[in-house]
Image (cartoon, helix red, strand yellow):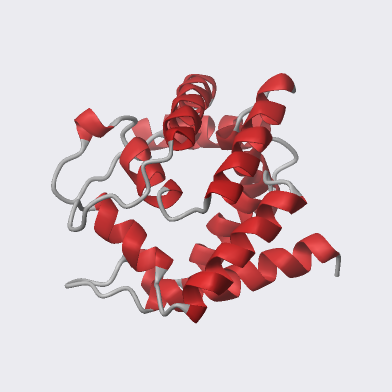
Amino acid sequence: MSHRATITDQILECELAMFLAVPTDQPYRCQQDPESFKLHRRAQFAAWSLATLQSYLADLQQARKNSRNLLAIKYARMENLIPCDNASPVIDTIIAMALDGQKRFIAAYPFLMRGGRPLDKAQDSPGVTSFETYLRGELETYSESTLALLLQDLQELERAGSSLSEATYRHLAAEWGFDSLQALEKTLEEKNKTSDR
């Protein structure tokens, strides 16, 4: 197993333990399906550099030492149950880049993204959390070091003509057995045509 894979596994182990301990009136769907949680989180981390992964693992380990559940904080922030305690300007920069990438990705892969989260916080409603609100809740739990490194990763993806959304879903497509995002999109389009008949 590569060093990168080992770091990612350690992150997933920490995150899953925190996620399963998130207090909630009704369990989140992923709390009842840990393998799905790990699959989707692993896909997100596939786009991160080793330095960013190592920094985030350090954030999680420090939080655990301090008895802080970063996943509980994330979900509480998403639902606006607690005040923001990380107003780093880097967060707004990352969100702007990620939103732009997500918009482009939705336009390129409409069948894949059908039924996904609404894009921006103006579309939040009870029981529905937008991509922007979810991302902000998560980014607010990261250290300055992790935020700075993640911003570099996004800039690198942008220079390569990609985005965090595209890199994440490319990994998922491969995990689901598809050769490319285009092949996955075509399959979903065909499935949609069949179900509309």
109 vs 91, nearest the viewer: 91
Identify the residue at the far right of this view: 2
Count of numbered tags? 0
Residue at (44% x, 32% y) in the render: 95
36 horizontally vs 57: left or right: left
Residue at the image position 51 percent from the left and 64 percent from the top: 36
Whether residue 163 sits left or right of residue 78 in the image: it is right
Residue 175 seen in this snapshot: yes
Q: Residue 178 appears at what percent x and percent y?
A: 70, 44
Residue 134, given in percent of the width and then of the height, sits at 35, 46
| Residue 194 % position (x, y) | 44, 34
- Quadrant in which the N terminus is drawn: bottom right
Instruction: Answer left or right for 57 relative to 160.
Output: left
Looking at the rendering, in which quadrant would you find the C terminus? Answer: top left
Quadrant of residue 103 within the rendered picture: top left
Residue 115 appears in view: no
Where 16 falls versus 173 (above or below)?
A: below
Residue 135, position as x, y percentages in the image: 41, 43
Between residues 4 and 27, which one lies in front from this camera angle? 4
What residue is shown at x 22% (from left), y 52% (from top)? 83
Asked if residue 120 is positioned above or below residue 57 in the image, the reply reads above
Which residue occupies the foreground of this view, 183 or 150?
Answer: 150
Asked if 28 appears above or below 89 in the picture, the reply is: below
